Image (cartoon, rainbow, N blue to C red):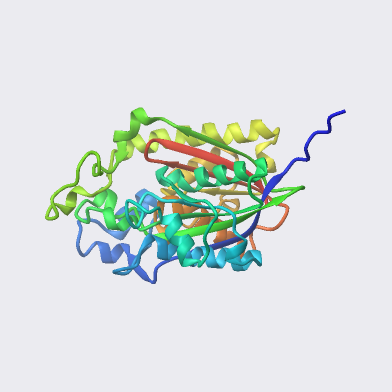
């Protein structure tokens, strides 16, 4: 008689985050680009964002978030068996930012790699790590979302310059027999990539050094908004249906922090009051793959998110990519 293998979950053992010291308000941006605090806040909900210091790299932000997550989990770096960094702004083309973080943590040997799914990078990374743990390949993992996205902005373009900030968030996952990540769901639609993209790359070719404006985020805002709302609604329903859970059972919605109107639209479809939605976009701006783990860490450390509660994480990013994770914290 064959006995079924016991089910294994990936439990969030610790969370951590890091934001650069420099804060840039809407009023400060208005001194260099034609905009205003009222214009930005009304359209996005953003009031300020953090900007990485000169010489401060994505791996530096990721390292600080990782240390705090390890401390919260009561673990040391040498216990980590897998490192995944979700980022679209790596330190260099290679080696990966994950291996750089690995070296800065003073460890070696475990697999370490990056995932580039733009703003969905953390959800994608969380999904990959969860598969490793469920399969028994590793017992624990460090998953980080980190960005220095302001390094690729055209600061004269008010449609994008006002949106983004820098930051990092991290979680430590541990194998658990009872609870953790219930399911994750990932999707992509490459045919719509031109609606939100950066035009520079190695194979495509670099631009002359003097043409730094070429290294920029290009976004068709209205189209992105429309597709994001539809995709997030779909992936949220997918997560609920996969687990036989009613929307009213969700304790907290922790969404990608891109735009307050998108967040509110998702909450409305879930019939979830905004006081059960974690919102940091007003203070962080859009930190791309860093936004969901940053919001999660803030919610945990503020005491709002408690053990045993049901969390729904979701994100949408360039590619297009989108995904969700239903988690019993």
Q: Residue furthest right?
A: 1
Residue at 62% in and 61% down: 79
- State the quadrant of the N terminus: top right
Residue 161 position in % (x across, y down): 27, 54
211 lies left or right of 151: left
Residue 281 position in % (x across, y down): 44, 55
Residue 146 shows up from this direction: no
169 lies left or right of 25: right
Q: Residue furthest front?
A: 109
Residue 155 position in % (x across, y down): 22, 56
Residue nearest the observer in this picture, 89 or 134: 134
Residue at 46% in and 61% down: 101
Residue 145 shows up from this direction: yes
Q: Is residue 52 above or below residue 6?
A: below
Residue nearest the observer in this picture, 231 or 135: 135
Residue at 43% in and 64% down: 61
Asked which quadrant contains residue 246, the reply is: top right
Asked which quadrant contains residue 198, the reply is: top left
């Amino acid at each position: 008689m064959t006995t079924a293998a016991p089910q294994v979950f990936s439990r969030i053992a610790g969370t951590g985050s890091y934001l650069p010291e420099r804060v840039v308000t809407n009023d400060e941006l208005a001194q260099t680009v034609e905009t205003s605090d009222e214009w930005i806040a009304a359209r996005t909900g953003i009031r300020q964002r953090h900007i990485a210091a000169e010489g401060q790299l994505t791996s530096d932000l990721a390292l600080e978030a990782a240390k705090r997550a390890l401390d919260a989990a009561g673990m040391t770096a040498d216990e980590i068996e897998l490192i995944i960094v979700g980022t679209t702004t790596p330190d260099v083309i290679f080696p990966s930012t994950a291996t750089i973080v690995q070296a800065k943590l003073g460890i070696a040997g475990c697999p370490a790699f990056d995932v580039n799914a733009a703003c969905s990078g953390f959800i994608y990374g969380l999904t990959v790590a969860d598969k490793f743990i469920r399969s028994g390949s590793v017992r624990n993992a460090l998953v980080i979302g980190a960005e220095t996205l302001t390094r690729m902005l055209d600061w004269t373009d008010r449609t994008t310059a006002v949106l983004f900030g820098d930051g990092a968030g991290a979680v430590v996952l541990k194998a658990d027999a009872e609870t953790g990540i219930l399911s994750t769901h990932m999707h992509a639609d490459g045919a719509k990539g031109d609606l939100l993209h950066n035009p520079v790359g190695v194979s495509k070719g670099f631009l002359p050094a003097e043409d730094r404006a070429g290294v920029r985020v290009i976004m068709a805002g209205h189209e992105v908004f429309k597709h994001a709302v539809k995709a997030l609604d779909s992936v949220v329903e997918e997560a609920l249906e996969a687990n036989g859970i009613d929307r009213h059972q969700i304790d907290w919605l922790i969404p990608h922090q891109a735009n307050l109107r998108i967040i509110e639209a998702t909450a409305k479809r879930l019939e979830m009051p905004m006081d059960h939605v974690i919102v940091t976009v007003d203070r962080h701006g859009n930190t791309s793959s860093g936004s969901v783990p940053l919001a999660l860490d803030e919610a945990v450390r503020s005491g709002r998110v408690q053990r045993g509660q049901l969390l729904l994480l979701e994100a949408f990013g360039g590619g297009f990519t989108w995904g969700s994770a239903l988690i019993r914290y």
